[in-house]
Image (cartoon, helix red, strand yellow):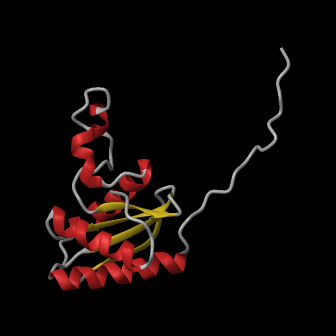
Amino acid sequence: MPFTIPEHTTHNAPSITRDAAWALLEAARAGARDIGIDVAIAVTDAAGHLKAFERSDHAPFLTAEVAIDKAWTAASFGVGTHVWNAILTDPKVAQLAHRPRMVSVGGGCPILDGGQVVGAIGISGGNAQQDQDAAETAIRALGFEVRA
């Protein structure tokens, strides 16, 4: 049986730049400071690979891994970590809750540019809503889109 060679065998995948990742980190730091929380902040590319990271001096050590995993989770499906609790109630996908690195607590947001996921940000150190607010503030400050 013959096969057809596709016209295109690769595609370009947009990704956040290093400079934009660090600018997001700085915007998130300012947002967390305004809220009054000490946090760890992680920014990943669209594939969930770490691009920028920072943990404030007084943020608990566990916040470092949680922030990275929040960003990874948000990048994985382009969905914010704050919506994963609802998703995981579906028995068809409930097993995802047992995946290492999966976080279903607010504070991880995909970063969208023109509707495409180009990265993700994860913040840990406050409560789930504070982390979420700081992440969304940073995304908007740089002109990226927040997925509701």
Q: Position of residue 147 (x, y in %)?
A: 37, 58
Residue at figure coordinates x 76%, y 43% from the top left: 9
Q: Position of residue 145 (x, y in %)?
A: 42, 66
Which image quarter: residue 39? bottom left
Q: Is residue 44 above or below residue 75?
A: below
Residue 104 located left or right of residue 139: left
Residue at figure coordinates x 21%, y 85% from the top left: 33
Q: Residue furthest top?
A: 1
Q: Position of residue 109 (x, y in %)?
A: 35, 61
Quarter occupied by the N terminus: top right
Q: Is residue 107 above or below residue 18?
A: above
Q: Is residue 8 above or below residue 112?
A: above
Q: Is residue 18 above or below residue 82?
A: below
Pick whichever, 145 or 45, lies toward us.
145
Residue at figure coordinates x 32%, y 58% from the top left: 70
Which image quarter: residue 26? bottom left
Residue 31 located left or right of residue 8: left
Q: Position of residue 124 (x, y in %)?
A: 23, 67
Residue 41 located left or right of residue 39: right
Residue at figure coordinates x 38%, y 80% from the top left: 141
Q: How many marks?
A: 0
Residue 146 located left or right of residue 1: left
Pick whichever, 2 or 48, lies toward us.
2
